[in-house]
Image: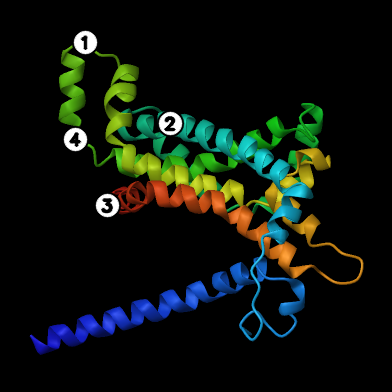
Amino acid sequence: MRKFNTKLILANLIAWTIAIIWLTPFIGLFMTSVRPFRELTRGWWNFEEVHFTLENYVEAFNRGMGKYLINSLIITIPSTAIPIFVAALAAYAFSRFSFPLKDILFVTLVFIQIIPSILVLIPLTILLREMRLLNTIAGLVLVHSSFAQPWIIFFLRNFFLTLPREIEEAAKIDGCSDFQIFMKIVLPLSAPALGSVASLQFLLVWNEFLFALIFLKSPELWPVTIGVTVLSQSQYIANWGLLSAASIIAISVPLILFLLIQKYYIRGLVMGAVKG
């Protein structure tokens, strides 16, 4: 019994230590965002003189953070919904049907994941220009949706393999088509996996910087990742309070999303890795 308590105390101590180390930069970022610049010259951890203010947040929104947030949502929501639905159809086909070159095609999709995005910037720029989608949100959504397909197919295919086929067979006996089975049975049962994939894809697109920088030239189309870098630019010295406030605003949306669907995120990660 004493040995068990010792292990439990040690595990909690390690967990709290890691949590404090992880939270310290965030606390510093938040404290910097709610204090005047003159109080930050000696470090945010100096509390000899403390005055809290929301001026940095007000200035961030006055300088365009609201527009950048809206642009990020316009980009991220379809870049999450479209690839998940398309990849779910493909993953269901890989997990349930037999067709020529099935294994070779699946292995090819897996290997596509290792291609660095920077290697395809020039071909993608030419392709989007020829399609008249360069410097458009639709073009950026198309790029994000395409890059998400391989890993989402791989993840959902593994999850679909864990679902009992007896339910689908019973539905076929009742006259349901394959598409009806997919929509009415497979997708509802896959809520944990879909929630996990949605949170990961949303976070990846929300935090993406390179594609937005290359494919969007107009400032009115920029997402929040580019907006934060624009706010940080100054002729003489960086306004760390403004930059911190903009960063807090930028991470608030994915943080809220994760808190809302964290149970699906954790369940989906565990269940999707059960069978390969």
Q: Nearer the viewer, residue 93 or 88?
A: 88
Give the amino acid type for the residue marked by disc 2 in the picture: Ala
Say the numbered circle drawn on residue 175.
Answer: 1
The location of residue 198, given as percent across then percent down, is 46, 42
* Vertical position of residue 126 compared to residue 15: above or below: above
Q: Quadrant of residue 125?
A: top right
Q: Quadrant of the N terminus?
A: bottom left
Mark 3 touches mark 1? (CB < 8 Å): no
Residue at 51% from the left image edge and 45% from the top image edge? 201
Identify the residue under disc 4. Answer: 164
N-term-proximal mark, 1 vs 4: 4
The location of residue 251, given as percent across then percent down, is 58, 55
Q: Quadrant of residue 223?
A: top right
N-term-proximal mark, 2 vs 1: 2
192 sits left or right of 18 in the view:
left
Give the amino acid type for the residue marked by disc 3 in the picture: Val
Identify the residue under disc 3. Answer: 274
Q: Is residue 122 visible?
A: no
Q: How are the residues colored? A: rainbow
Mark 2 touches mark 1? (CB < 8 Å): no
Residue furthest out toward the top:
175
Q: CA distance from mark 1 to mark 4?
A: 18 Å
Residue at 61% from the left image edge and 83% from the top image edge? 47
Say the numbered circle drawn on residue 90.
Answer: 2
Task: Give SS at disc 2.
Answer: helix
Q: Residues within 10 Å of mark 1 (few under 14, many from 20)?
A: few
Q: CA distance from mark 3 to mark 2?
A: 20 Å
